[in-house]
Amino acid sequence: MRPDADPAGELAFLETLADAARPLALRHFRTGVRADSKGGDGAADYDPVTAADRNIETALRALIAEHRPGDGVLGEEHPETVSRTGRTYIIDPIDGTRAYIAGLPTWCVLIALSGPDGPAASIIDQPFTGERFLGVTGRGAWLDRGAGRAPIATRGSGVTRTEDAIITTTDPGLFAGAEAAAFASLARAARVRRYGLDAYGYAALALGGVDLVVENGLKPWDVAALVPVVTGAGGVITDWRGGPCHHGGQVVAAASPALHARALEALAPAAG
């Protein structure tokens, strides 16, 4: 991102994008929309995509091309548009497509603005519940339910031990081998375990509910929008080694630095 860029000021355009995505997402939700698989037909290779995924990304790319010419776009459903400005919008039009086709309201629209140092500002939007989570990396996070933004924060120093934490992952069945063993050990120590939330789990962490999110095999568009919201709310989000996670792969997010350190210790045997 350019040195003179104002991430907080960029939230207005991110909201324009999220506003455009909402009706396109709701048009097909709970309608029995057909899902095609980008992978194989077997359960292990199933990678669903719907008309909502494709239509949202197409619409957002058109708006970016019109209002932010030269900026790049990296999305799940279409080839990358390479940036000429150092700024890239990273889009997951429907994060949690499995939840979407099942009629469950835990899917989200993810939109981030990223620069050379990674994601700077983002939105995690849940059109069905009307919840919009906004973040600026390390500077603040907010929830807007339609009546204006209100600041949000993780539980922070209120939870420093795994034994006191609420932990989530999208699907524990996605872990295998050493990763599965490391996650299982961490999850057994936690006070509460809840699964199946996709990106909504990270929004819940920023809101002060969930305390720890652990995942693997993520893509850049799965992660970019999470970083500003989690860190803006006072949380920590990295890979399993404690480094930047916005390129995808293994991800751990925590409500406090102390809890994050505990999680890294538990995950270290399987850190890639």
Image (cartoon, rainbow, N blue to C red):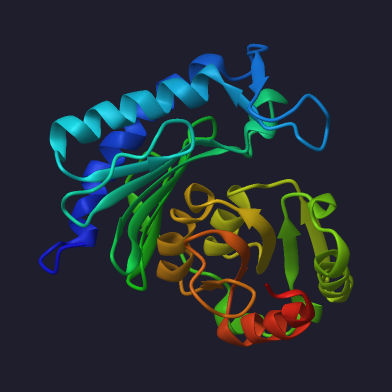
Q: Is residue 199 left or right of residue 12?
A: right
* Residue 72 locus on image (x, y percent): 26, 45
- Can you tell which quarter of the image residue 156 is in? bottom right
Q: Choose between 133 and 41: the one closer to the eye.
A: 41
Q: Is residue 167 left or right of residue 22?
A: right
Q: Residue at x 75, y 77 (%)?
A: 267
Q: Is residue 15 left or right of residue 144?
A: left
Q: Choose between 229 and 263: the one closer to the eye.
A: 263
Q: Is 101 rendered above or below residue 141? A: above
In the rendered image, the residue lying farthest to the left is 4
* Residue 173 locus on image (x, y percent): 84, 51
- Can you tell which quarter of the image residue 50 is in? top right
The quarter of the image holding the N terminus is bottom left
Q: Is 160 rendered above or below residue 75? A: below
The quarter of the image holding the C terminus is bottom right
Q: Residue at x 28, y 66 (%)?
A: 116
Q: Choose between 228 and 217: the one closer to the eye.
A: 217
* Residue 252 locus on image (x, y percent): 63, 69
* Residue 96 locus on image (x, y percent): 62, 38
Q: Residue at x 64, y 47 (%)?
A: 198
Q: Is 107 rendered above or below residue 87? A: above
Q: Residue at x 83, y 69 (%)?
A: 187
Q: Is residue 83 left or right of residue 244?
A: left
